[in-house]
Amino acid sequence: MQDKHSEGKENNLLLDEMDRMILNEIQSHFPIEARPYQVLAETLGCSEEEVLQRVQDLKDRDVIRRIGANCNSRKLGYTSTLCAAKVPSRLMERFVEVVNSYMGVTHNYRRDHDYNIWFTLIAPSKEKIERILGEIVELTQVAEIISLPAERLFKIQVDFEV
Amino acid sequence: MSGKRQFTPLEKKIIHELQQDLPVVRRPFAAVAERVGISESELLEKVREFVADDIIRRFGATLRHQRSGFDANAMVVWEVEVERAEEVGNILASFREVSHCYQRPAMENWPYRLFTMIHGSSPEVCREIAQRMADAVGVEKYDLLFTQEELKKTTMAYFGESENEPGN
């Protein structure tokens, strides 16, 4: 994972102006059209073929991770929460393995705090979230896990200028 | 946020497919439509509807490094009484260094109610940003939790397993 990161970072430096324009455009304004790359080509003043080639290249270089939908979990009827756990180092490996095995765990980070592991959990219901957290405690012997579901959203930035 | 919408099996299938990686071809939506078993124009109409209804928050490319040139990330947490949470949250969210800002429940062993993700070129820069934010809202009790390691980062597969879907 670490290698992939530094590799990608170097690749970022190799982006030319057209790459940047494409990336800035397709993060949030990917055309929902039959020929999206043709529409992009018109916006950017190049050919459809060139846009396709560059996007494929950006994917091959791992600058673009994915092109697709990012859904609003709540609107789809799902429930989500942010969980924090105090994990002693002797239990760390097992804890990360168990937590990451759940499909609903989409992000997991180690942070410098007593609560040293922070992960997001998405599930079809509150009950399912409770059940998964119960399973994690049982399987890992890590008892100190708190669940902090969002009560209010002030900001979520969805795209980033390249 | 209001009203629970019910999704038809076809809509669930469409949402599931749209979360996969769109092929880089001239007519990518035609490829998805074929997998779903509808026409390209029907699919495009559905995608536009989902975007308009905020069911799809964003349709497009997700980058590997969302903040190129920003090497330090910190979750900054703020101890704020519930009465001030909305006011303080709005001010913290207005900082351009903040990518996410949420209010979450405070509890006995976790006094912090507001959460912000900030991005800077170094830990020192992150501390300076947090100090400026603290000054702006007049909150003294806050903490920075730096990201030490990314252990998982994926996209949720909604409507992926039929037995695991939201109930009615």
Image (cartoon, coloured by chain):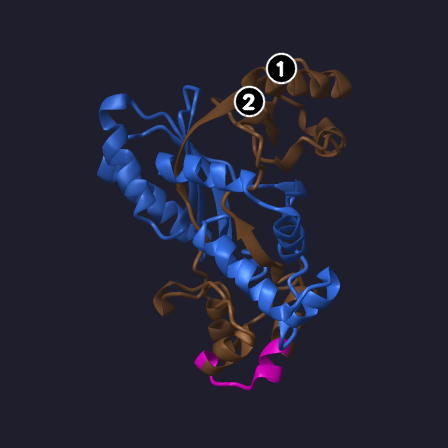
Chain colours: A blue, B brown
Q: Do labels 2 and 1 share a chain?
A: yes
Q: Which residue type carries mark 1? A: Lys
Near-viewer residue (B132 or A82): B132
- The quadrant the N terminus of chain A occupies is top left
Residue B16, visible in the rendered structure: yes
Q: Which chain does the residue under circle 1 lie in? A: B
Q: Tell me whether circle 2 and circle 1 mark residues in contact (CB < 8 Å).
A: yes
Near-viewer residue (B111 or A73): A73
Label 1 belongs to which residue?
B141
Q: What's the residue at 56%, 20% (across, down)?
A: B122
Task: Please state which of the two labelled residues, at mark 2 or mark 1, is closer to the viewer.
Answer: 1
- The quadrant the C terminus of chain A occupies is top right
- Tag 2, which secondary structure? loop
Whether the magenta-drawn stretch holds residue B43 is answered as yes
Picture coordinates of residue B135, whole percent (x, y): 74, 15
Label 2 belongs to which residue?
B111
Q: Give the range drawn in magenta.
A: B35-44
Q: What's the residue at 65%, 78% (across, down)?
A: B45
